[in-house]
Amino acid sequence: MKKGSKAYSIIRFTCPHCHEGEFFVNRNPYHLSTAGDLLDKCPVCGRRYTPEPGFYYGGMYVSYALAVALCTTLYVAMVVLWPAAPIWADATVVIGGLVALAPWLYALSKIMWANLFMTYKGVGPTEAEQRKAAERAAGQPA
C-alpha cells in the first residue's frame, strides 16, 4: 500500500489530504475519553477536517454497514466452526464482538467517511488554495 491511496490514510488514521498528519486527537480508538475526537485541522498541511457542520453524521451509515458486516461474519464463522452451538452462544459471540470492536468501528467509519469526500493533495497548498491566499493578500492594505 503506497502513500496517495485512500487505503493508506484509512489504515494509518492519517490526514486524507496529505497522508502525514494525525486525524484523531488520540490515535488509539480504545482511549474512550477521546474516542472519535478529531483535530480541527491537520498539523502538517493545515487543512480543516470538518468542511461543514454535521459533516460526520454521514459516517453513521458507514458505521452501520461495518457493524452489519462484522455481525454477519461472526455469525457465519460460528455456524461453520461450531454448528451445534446453542443460539445463546451465537448471540454472545456476535454481541461480544460488536461491543469489543465498537470504538474501532467508530473511528474507522469517520476516517472512511472523510476519505470518501477528501482527496489526496500532498503536503503543499493546492493551486486553488494558493490563488485564494494571493487574492486575500492583494485585497489587504499593505
Image (cartoon, helix red, strand yellow):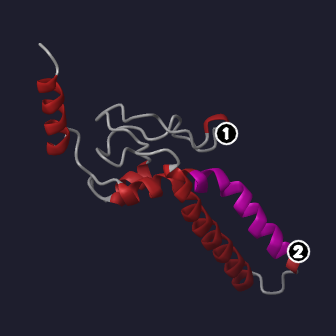
At 44% across and 47% down in the image, what residue appears? 13
At 46% across and 57% down in the image, what residue appears? 113
SS of the residue at dot 2? helix
Instruction: Name the quadrant containing residue 2.
Output: bottom left
Tell me which secondary structure the magenta stretch mostly adopts. Answer: helix
Q: On the picture, is 138 further left or further right than 123?
A: left
Q: On the picture, is 107 further left or further right than 138?
A: right
Real-space CA distance between mark 2 and mark 1, rounded to the nearest whole angstrom:
29 Å
SS of the residue at dot 1? helix
The quadrant the C terminus occupies is: top left
Residue 43 lies, in percent from the top left, at 36, 31
Q: Earlier in the sequence, mark 2 or mark 1?
A: 1
Q: Disc 2 designates what residue? A: 88
Task: From the viewer's side, name the closer residue of 73 and 54.
Answer: 54
The nearer-to-camera label among 2 and 1 is 1
- Residue 68 on the magenta span: no
Residue 127 lies, in percent from the top left, at 14, 44
The quadrant the N terminus occupies is: bottom left
Say what amino acid the circle numbered 2 marks.
Trp
Say what amino acid the circle numbered 1 marks.
Leu
Structural crowding at the residue carrying mark 2, measured as other residues with C-alpha within 10 Å and reported as few (<14), some (14–19) or many (≥20): few
Please state the extent of the stretch shown in magenta in the rendering: 88-106
Q: Disc 1 designates what residue? A: 32
Task: From the viewer's side, name the closer residue of 58 and 36.
Answer: 58
Residue 85 lies, in percent from the top left, at 84, 81
Structural crowding at the residue carrying mark 1, measured as other residues with C-alpha within 10 Å and reported as few (<14), some (14–19) or many (≥20): few
Task: From the viewer's side, name the closer residue of 138 and 114.
Answer: 138
At 15% across and 25% down in the image, what residue appears? 139
